[in-house]
Each structure stands twice: as structure tokens, then as C-alpha cells.
Image (spheres, rainbow, N blue to C red):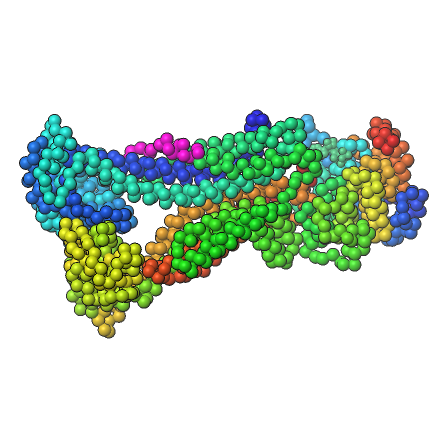
Amino acid sequence: MRHAVTRGRAAIVCEPKGAIVSTSAPPPSANDRVAASAVHATKWYGHGDTAVAALKDVSVSFDSGRFAAVMGASGSGKSTLMHCLAGLDRLTDGRIIIGGTDLSTLDDRALTLLRRDRIGFVFQAFNLVPTLTAKENIELPVALAGSKVDPAWFDEVVTMVDLRDRLAHRPSELSGGQQQRVAIARALASKPELIFADEPTGNLDSASGTTVLEFLRHAVDHMGQTIVMVTHDPAAASWADRAVFLSDGGIVGDIADPTAASVLERMQALDPRMAAGHERTRG
Amino acid sequence: MFRTTLANLSRRKLRLLATSLAVLLGVMFTAGTLVLTDSLSATFDSLFSDVYAHTSAVVRSNQKVNGDLRLAAAGPTRGTMPDDLVAQIAKAPGVRAVSGNVQGYTQIVKRNGKALGNPNQGPPTMGSSWSMQRTLSPYRLVAGHAPTSANEIVTDLSSAKDAGYRIGDQVPLLTPTGRITRTLVGLTKFGSAGAAGGSTMVQFTLPEAQRVLSKRGQLDEIWVGAKPGVTETQVVASIQALHLEHTEVLTGLAASQQAKKAATSFLSFFTVFLLVFAIIALLVGAFIIANTFSILVAQRTRELALLRAIGATTRQVLASVVTEAAVVGVIASTVGLALGYFVASMLQSILMKGSSLGSGTTLSVRTVVGSYAIGIGITVLSAVFPARRAARVPPVAAMRDSAVEDHSHGVARTIIGAVFLVIAAAALVGAATTKSAALVGLGAPAGLIGAVVFGPVLAQVMARITRVLVRRTGMPGHLGVENVLRNPRRTASTASALMIGATLVCAISVFASSAVASINKLVDTGFHGDVVVTSTGNGIPLADVARIETSPEVASIAAVRYGAAMIGGQGTLFSASDPAALSHLVDLKVESGDVAHLGPGDIAVSATLATAQHWAIGTKVPAAMLDGSHPTLTVRAIYRSRLVAQEVFGSPETFKGSLVVPSAMIAFVAAKPGVSGSALAASLDKVVRNNPTAKVQTNAQYKRSAASQMDSFLKIVYAMLLLAVIIAFIGIVNTLGLSILERVRELGLLRAVGMTRSQLRVTVRIEALLIALTGTVIGLVLGTAIGSALIKSFGPNQALTGFAIPWGRLVTVLVAGVVVGLAASLLPARRAARLDPLDALASE
Ligand SMILES: Nc1ncnc2c1ncn2[C@@H]1O[C@H](COP(=O)(O)OP(=O)(O)OP(=O)(O)O)[C@@H](O)[C@H]1O
Ligand SMILES: [Mg+2]
């Protein structure tokens, strides 16, 4: 547990990110547990000469009730790590443990049920089933499990993402930002142990992106959620409690309470070109 | 542009496979039908050229009854000639040889006691005279010797083999005059073949043939051979110069051409019957093709828009899609043609077994051109609508993110569909209430078109209903229903294929069950006797009838004979029996007059015929019989029930000039008081035991066998419709497969957020089920409506007065629809479940 960092919220209150960010402490018990960990995780793609090592002996843990950002250059293995952690893909070597369950021991059905009951997802795009309304999309994992969302909880989640008047709409009738909010609501609705978000703001303009990040932050602070978010964007990473840096399939950095500046600095150290790209676009 | 088209084709080989299969099956059916009938027709050609190969002239009676196939089934439709004409003709100049012949029914009883062949359902079983003029006969001896005495016969080689007899054996024979036993002394071959087109032939000496066939002193045909150097026309002229009474003379060539024509007219009936099913298959195929192209075009919206954006004209895009269809059409037609040829040649060898006739399978230019025209035509036509939609894709669609989803089904389309359905409903109700079957001819196609056009709305309604029903099965079922709803047009056109099949099956089933109900009703209310005697051969010889009549248990019997005569200037099928006995044993539903007391020269006629000819009680009707007599008949009664009595009924005395065959087609028997129907049947069974074709049945057994005959007819029709169902099945598989490819990302997402493989399979299954059920349920309703309207449209004059909805069969159709749906979902569901969620999510 070498990356486990415990501290209060006050550290990032300085970030000027709107009203939702709270100064209150998270539920104390949340910090005692590791939500997910990778142990000597190695992932190879392909065979023979064309084989690529997407993850090389990665060991990392994510604590309950925390918001972690995974950063790195394109092709560094962020998505691969997240997919393996989430039970969407299998490691070539090493282990993934989610809340005490070793994923390598599970078959396809058990993995599917684990994703359904214990993990929430927010993808970069194509998050929603087009034939279902926003409400049905939010309830989807719970409905697949054959049960019903607790109405009070549903209410709380929907209020949080501010979608009350959009519940009967289909995804095609929603803006990109609204669709991402529906996706967040879906991820929260089943009260999963852990939410994975792969560039959830990648397709959004900065205002909608900020709103989405606010909700993720809020879910961690007020609902005790655990979130692991993959991002390219130093500003997005600054919303997290911790930033883990990947390069070439290995962990090359791990900073607590990242700010946009500290993240950029670290990125520049790792890969000057990439950071320069960010500077320009932010210009 | 053409290169792009080809590139497209090769990239989507698999998806187009199903389309090709739909065209292919239809073309195969069409080509097979054409090849088979061409080959059979070629066989008949060679057969009849063989018959008259050495005959220069044919002399026959000019007394004949003109009419359709039904008449021919009643017995001979041409009169006979006195046999002393042979001597006269032999003296005519230019004549080298003359041979007088008679022909009729003779059936061989096999070694196992069963009759060989079934002339009611297959090729004829014949008996004839052996021509002593070897050069004139198409039959030649291959073993033994010719019959020289009344006790001797020859048969064709394959019949002897099939029946299990060798030269020297005693052979039991069924003839119009009863059962006889003769010694087999020789075996024959027909021309170059073993038997003439699967028929059986027993040949007697001429006097014996005249006796057993009940044509004493009579001849059917006289064959004439000309002297060397004398042409056919010359010898015909020289015979005509004799001015023989009641005869006509024609050349051998003309005689063989006429015989060919008669056979071909039967063949063309057969061709039309098969082609109807081929067309149904093609029609169903057209929906599948149109559907596949719509989906492919929808999936390629962006690609087409990109083409448009970089400067392709609307016309070019249209041409590209149509070219693609044409290429599919060419390939599918070629394979379909080849398979059709193969199937036809297989069928031909089965049909022609036992004879080496028609050595080759015929592939005519008509078949090749027709198959390609139909295959390519249907494919291109079906692709034109989607292609036009494709051409209208605006260039900006290339920039849009998601494929355009078609939720609408067009107001115009809905209105047009509704109008058609209203017309159909009005026509069908009108047909039933005004008793005009012609209105069904309007209502049925209008209903089918309406159901297809209105289909999207119906599909939505079905899905909405199902949504309520599957709510309990949870999310997977719900998603399946939503998938059906996301494109009602696609659902509807996929379901249309199955709907057409279901409509036809249901309409025919309702018709058939009503026909059975009619017979049941007729037997229950109209047969006052206890036992019915019929025959699978050529009727019950009158000698057998006489033996039944004298049985101690029999109170009365009415034996009905059929024949053909010209009555009121028209070839007419009549029935003859003892009027008092028949009206006692069968209720003819007499409208007016008195049937029981018809005397010689009196007739009773059906109400239909009376209306058509404007005949009433007392009308004098001119008639012409086969023997050349011209009696004037008087209408004395009008009846409605034609099943037994046909169009005209009278005493045998009235029709004696046309009652050539001494057999009854059906006999009604009443038991003496105290004797039960089954006891009577059992004792009559013994009376007719020597005739293996005779069937003695109680009224209840008769009803059952009528129903089972209907069942065997239905089986043939269902088998023919099976092809349409198979094509519909392919269509569902295809649509589902394409839809799944379209939704790969969505499926990946579902799997990622926790949908299990079995849940995903349920979703696909529900979708398939719903498509299949939409088609089946609409077909059930439409088919039942059409079938019912048709039955109800027949007036009280018709034989079909019963009406019965075959509930069991309709439920079977519904279950079959479910099975088709479930089976169609197997492959696509497996494919969907196999998707790796990550790959699916990453796919573009
Ligand atoms: N299915 C695959 N087959 C082969 N190689 C793969 C596959 N998926 C990923 N890779 C390779 O593995 C490495 C890590 O990929 P990964 O998608 O995890 O990167 P990433 O950090 O998410 O990049 P990005 O920021 O561009 O999304 C890359 O070199 C990539 O080419
Ligand atoms: Mg990635």
C-alpha cells in the first residue's frame, strides 16, 4: 500500500471550481479499505514479433472513498489498466483484486455479474443505450440484476446530476454533456464499490466537462464513492485526490492532491512534447 | 463508380449471401419447374411420335364431347365405330395394312393381391387389343409370343416385373366387366422404352379385348399403313372417299400432334400449379432483398454521403446500388438455375422410373432467359427503393455522428395502407354477404398489400402489446421489444415474408377444413344409406353391384355411374342411377320438381346449370350422345347438391348412348332393418373381396377418408409453401444479423455494464420472436378472413356449404411461427453473445 495517502479535503479547497466542492470530511471508515488493486499486472497484446506489452509489472492500489486520476501519454496503457481493473479484460500475468475478489478466478459470467453489481462505468462516448430513456438507462444495471433502484437513492442521484426534467428523453434527444451526466447517474445508481471513468470529459467542451467533474467530485465527497478516472487533461486531473502517471506500461509517478500546475510540471518531466501540446491548446 | 460497387460487394460477401440465397431459392423453384415440364413435355413428344410412328392415317368416330379435363375423368369422350369398317378400309386404294383397336381400363392384380398402380392418382392402367399388324403398333414383343387365344395376354415388361409375374403365370386382372384371370404369354416394350410414361398395358386378342372392355363389335381407332410411295395425305383422301358414316380421318402426324396437345394441356396445368408457388417464393424473396438493401444502405449512409460530398451525383449513387443488386442477381440466378436443373433432373428420374423415356433433361432458352430475367429483375426492382433513398442522402450526413435512425413510417404510407385494408375488409365482407367469390379476388390481394404497407403500424402495435407482456421478463425482454420498435419499417418488411406464407397456409386451411365440414354435413344430412362403396380403380363393375344388391343384408342400393354427353350444346358431366333408389338414399336438396319419378328422357339439373342456361321445369333440351343418338331431354327437377349428382342427373336408360363403361363410380347401400352399418360393411367387404380397388365404408369411414384425402392434398400445398417459409426464415436471420452488426457498440456497452451472455441471447430471441409473431399473427388473421370469406361467398347452390375454422391448425401455425422465430434467433444470438465487450466498444 505504498501509494495510500490519507488526508482531509481542505487541501484542494483552494481550487476555484464552484460551489459543490465541500470542505467537510469524507466518511472516516472509507479510508481504511482498498477498493481495487493491481498486483504485478502485466498485459501483452498480440503474439510473437508483433507482441506489445501494454502493462509491465504494474502494482497499484486505489483506496475506497477516493478520487484517483490515471494520467499518461497516448498509448501508455491507461485504458488497458482500467479495463483490466474493471474486469473487462484479462491480464496476461499478475492479479487484479476488487474488494477482496481475485478477478483471475472468475469466469465470464461471474465477471459480468461483478461489473453489473459492484462496478460503475463512464466511458468517453457511446455511454447510453439509444432505445432506452434516460431513466431506463440510469436503472439499466439494476434492472439487469432483476431488482429496483431504491427510489430515495434514485432521487438523490438524479437531483445531483440535475436531470429531473430529462428522464423521459432518449439519448438522441440529449446533449453530449447531458448524456455524460446520465452515464454518471447510471454509474452511481447501483451503489457500486468503484466507478471507472475513461476520459469522461474527452468529448465535451470545457463548461460541460467541468460540470461532469463537479458531479464526480460530489459523488466522492458526499456519497462516499470511489472513482478511478483516466484523463489526458491536467485540469481534469486536478479534481482528483491523487494522480498516478503511466508511461510505456509502467507507473512512473504518483502525486497526491494534484493541481493543474503540478500535473503539468510532472508531465513535462515525463514527456516534454505532450505537455507542450497541452500548453498550446490551452493557450 | 463500378469499381467502388465491386469493392463493396466483395467486402460484404457474407451479408449478401442471405440476399442471394433468397433470390437463389426462388429462381431454383422457377427454373426447376420449367426444366421439369419441358423435359416431361419432350418425353410426351417422343411418346406420341412413337405411338403413330408407322401409322399413315387414323380413322376414328366423329362423335365426341368437347370439354375440359374434368370431363375426361368421367370416361371416354369419343364414340366408337363398328369393326366391319376395317374390311372396307382395307380395300381403299393405297392402303397396305389396317389394324382395328380398342382400349380401356385394365388393372393388374399383383402377386400380393394388391392392384398395380392407381389410375386416379397416377399414370393410366390400360388394356387394349394386340395389333396383329406388327408394323403399325408402337409395342413390340421382347419375349414370348403374341396372344393368339382368348386366354392369352401380353403385358409391358416393367409392369410384369413390378407385379411379380413371368411368362406362363396366371395373371388376375381387373376390367370394366369384372375380375378375370389370363395366362401371360409375352412381354412387350413401348417403342424404345419399357412402358409408356409409367402407364401399365395389358393386351388381349382383339375379340377378347372387345369383350372384356365391353366394346363388342366396336373399335376406338383404326390404324392404317400406306403402300410404299403413297403419302399420308393421299391415303387419308382415299379413305375419306369411302364416305364412312360418323368417322373422321386424319394423318398419323396430325393424330400424334393432337395427342401431344392433350397431354401438354395437362402439363401446363401442372406447370401453372408449380409456378404459382415459385412466384410466391420469389415474392417473399423480394421482401428479403429489399430489406437487406435498405439495411445495407442505412449502414452505409455516411459512406454514401461522403461519396456525394466529394462529388458523386445522385444518379451515380443510385447506379452504384442498382449495379450491386444486378451483380447479386446474376450470381444468384446462375446458381439457382443450375440447382433448379439438377433438382428437376432428379425429380424426372423419380417420376420416370421404370421407363428409359425422356433420356435427357431439357434446358430450353425460355428457361434460361426466364430464370435470369426473374432473378435479376426481382433483385434490381427490390433494390431500387432503398437505392433511391440512398441517393437522397444529403452530403451533410457524412458529418453527422450517428447513422440516421428511421423511426417514422410516413403518414402517406400509413394512409395508403389503411385504405387498402379498408377496401380489403369491405370486399371480404361483401363477398360473404353477397355470395360473390369474385370479390375475394379483390379482397385477398388488397388485404396482402394493405398488410404490407400498413405493416409498420401493425408491427408497432404488436410490439406495444408484447411490451406489456414481457415486462415481467425484465430488462432483456424490454430491450428486445425496443429493438423491434426502433425501426418498425424494417420489422414489418422482415415479417412480411412470413406473413405471406402464414396468410396462404391459413386461407387454404380454412378452405380445406370447410370443404371437409361440407362433406361431413352432406354425409350426415344427405346420405340416408348406411354404407358407401367406391373404388380406387375404374369404379365398381356392374357385376359387383349386382352381387351387392342380392346380398341378404341389403335393403336398397343406388349405384351412380358417370359419363359425358353434349347436353344443351355443351360438354356436360352427368350422373345416372335409378332415380327412385337414389332419391331415397341421397338427399339432392331438390329445389323444385320430382327426382324420384324421372322417366326415360327426363333429367334433373343442378340449380347452377339451370340458372346459367335459363332452364326451368319443362324445358326441352337437345342432347348428343357418344353413340351418335340425339335425344331430346326434358327438365323435370332442379337440385342444389352437386357432389353426387354433378350437373345433370337421369336414369341409365336416359343416357344409354353415352354410358360406355359398365361400372359405377359410387354406390349407396342401405341395410335391412336390424343390420348395423358396420355389419353391412363387413359383409359387403366379403362380396367385393375379389376387387382390391373396391372400398366399402360406413358413412363415418367415408367421412374420415374424405378428410384424409384432403389432408394429403394439403400436405402437398404446405410442402410447396415451405420454401416461402424457409426464405422468410433466412430473411429474419439476415435482418437480425445485420442489425446486430449495426449495434455492436451498444451490445458492447450492455455487456460492460453487466448484461450476461444469456440475457443478451434473450434480447435477441425476443426480437426474433416478435418479428416472427408479427408476421404470423397478421397472416393468421388475414388468411382466416380470406379463407372464411371465400367459403362464405359460395352460394347455397355450391357443394361447399359447411364452414369450419381449423383451430388446431391455426394454433399449429402460431406455434410454427414461434419456432421459426426462435430458430432464426439462434445464430444471431450466438454471434451477439460471443462479442467481446471491449472489442465491441472499440469498434467504429
Ligand atoms: N487490442 C489491442 N491489440 C493490440 N494492441 C493493443 C490493443 N489495445 C491496446 N493496444 C496497445 O497497448 C498499448 C496501450 O494501449 P492503451 O489503449 O491502454 O493506451 P492509452 O493509454 O489508453 O492511450 P490513449 O490515451 O490513446 O487512449 C498501446 O501501445 C496500444 O497500441
Ligand atoms: Mg485510452
Depth check: give the residue in front, B583 or B760: B583
In the rendered view of the protein, which quadrant contains the C terminus of chain B? top right
Depth check: give the residue in front, B186 or B371: B371
Query: Residue placed at 68% from the left, 46% from the top?
Result: A130
Q: Ligand 1 quadrant?
A: top right
B73 relative position to B505: left or right? left
Q: Is residue B623 above or below residue A126?
A: below
x and y, in percent, of residue A97 in the image: 76, 45
B532 relative position to B713: left or right? left
Q: Which residues are magenta?
A: B358-373
Residue A139 in view, yes or no: yes
x and y, in percent, of residue B564 in the image: 22, 52
x and y, in percent, of residue B551 in the image: 17, 66
x and y, in percent, of residue B272 in the image: 36, 43
Residue B427 is a magenta residue:
no
Query: Residue placed at 29% from the left, 43% from the top?
Result: B266
Residue A192 in view, yes or no: no
Query: What number of labels is visible?
Result: 0
Depth check: give the residue in front, B199 or B589: B589
Q: Is residue A85 above or below residue B544?
A: above
B360 relative position to B464: left or right? left
Query: Residue placed at 32% from the left, 66% from the top?
Result: B524
Residue B366 is a magenta residue:
yes
Q: Residue furthest bottom?
A: B674
Query: Residue placed at 9% from the left, 31% from the top?
Result: B94
In the rendered view of the protein, which quadrant contains the N terminus of chain B? top right
